[in-house]
Amino acid sequence: MNPSIYFSEVTDPRVTGRCLHLLSDILMIGLCSYLTGGVNYEDMRLFALEHGDNLKDMLSLSNGAPSEDTFDCVFQRIDPSELDYCLRSYGQSILSDLSEKQIAIDGKKQSGATPTSRGNRGLYILNAWVSENKFCISQKAVDDKSNEITAIPEVLSGIDIEDAVVSIDAMGTQREIADLILDKKGHYLLAVKGNQKSLYEDIECAFKVNGGLDTDTTIEKDHGRIEVRKCSILPAREYLLEETIQSWRGLGTIIKIESIREISGKTTYETRYYISDETGSSASYFQKLVRGHWSIDNQLHWHLDIIFKEDDCRTRKGFSPQNLSVLRKVALHIVSEQKDKLSLKRRIYKAALDINYLRSLLGY
């Protein structure tokens, strides 16, 4: 699907009649730069200079290549909610129905945009990720990770989650968020840690009394790393205090994940707990959901940093970090959808070498 269709919906933040370059050109050049290995405004201008004449069906460029300052000015001022709408629309064109999908929600710190911040402080982008399809369908910027609690409802409000499973880490394990998911006819899988102390202790006690009515064990080996994960589940109403049941609407199943990792001869142990409103499902089902949630780290955040060098980007003025993050995600989706045997990194390299391959990626 040609992404330029969705870019046409973005409002130009500049004064009408005083612009030398079309907003659609600037957005497409930015996207093409990421598809060919570019990382900054210098690369965007260089792409326009080198390929502008070869892409006249995609780009107007009636006044030549935009300057670096032009790219900087425009991306600072574009309303990020409009580009996020483009991201959602692009996702909906490929995934028209999210029912029975898993939507993982997690935040990623923009290290390049806030290089002096420490710990959980700094600019975070909260992402909604469809784990089965490896697709980011929405994002929301938050200034401090503690504010994810207020940002999560904003992300969910723009997505149809009916019959989908929404998985969130412990920061988002809040009664109001569980209520919102159920109100929108979705299902929740929420991690439980010390920020919900009474819930955590009740679940911990339940599994001490009974190891689990159903269990599932998986073994994963990769590059000298061995990990054994055991998932155990219990029906919440039979093993938790009535006070806990009443506090968490729809609570149906509690989940325990025990992980044993061996890396270079060193062994570590970890136990995690989760709650879900779903009942009647097997331990293997919840094992897959928990594993699916972490795909947002392995297949979105990792690719943004390693392939698109997001953490190396020092652009930090205005709305630039959020807007450029959208372009990177659209670029990631485009190269991920390409049907060939090349890796993502090699697809980007080939697009930089072969203008016709770039055209095929963009649907021209």
Image: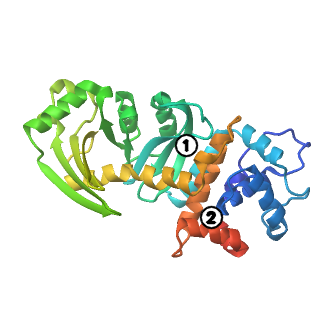
Q: Residue at x 61, y 41 (%)?
A: 112
Q: Residue at x 63, y 68 (%)?
A: 349
Residue 146's place in the image compared with 213, above or below, is: above
Q: Residue at x 11, y 36 (%)?
A: 208
Residue closest to the eye, 333 or 347: 347
Q: Position of residue 69 (x, y in %)?
A: 82, 44
Q: Position of residue 34 (x, y in %)?
A: 66, 57
Classify the position of the N terminus by image quarter.
Answer: bottom right
Q: How many marks?
A: 2
Between marks 1 and 2 in the image, the one whose residue lies nearer the viewer = 1
Residue 249's place in the image compared with 30, above or below, is: above
Q: Residue at x 15, y 42 (%)?
A: 234
Residue that extends furthest to the front in the rendered view of this protein:
265
Residue 198's place in the image compared with 340, above or below, is: above
* Amino acid under disc 2: Met
Secondary structure of residue under mark 2? loop
Secondary structure of residue under mark 1? strand
Mark 1, residue position: 139
Mark 2, residue position: 1
Q: Are marks 1 and 2 in contact (CB under 8 Å)?
A: no
Can residue 31 be seen in this snapshot? yes
Residue that extends furthest to the left in the rendered view of this protein:
209
Classify the position of the C terminus by image quarter.
Answer: bottom right
Judge the density around disc 1: few (<14), some (14-19), many (≥20) Cα neighbours within 10 Å. Answer: many
Residue closest to the eye, 160 or 16: 16
In the rendered structure, the answer to whether residue 239 lies left or right of residue 186 reads left
Mark 1–mark 2 Cα distance, whole angstroms, equals: 20 Å
* Amino acid under disc 1: Gln
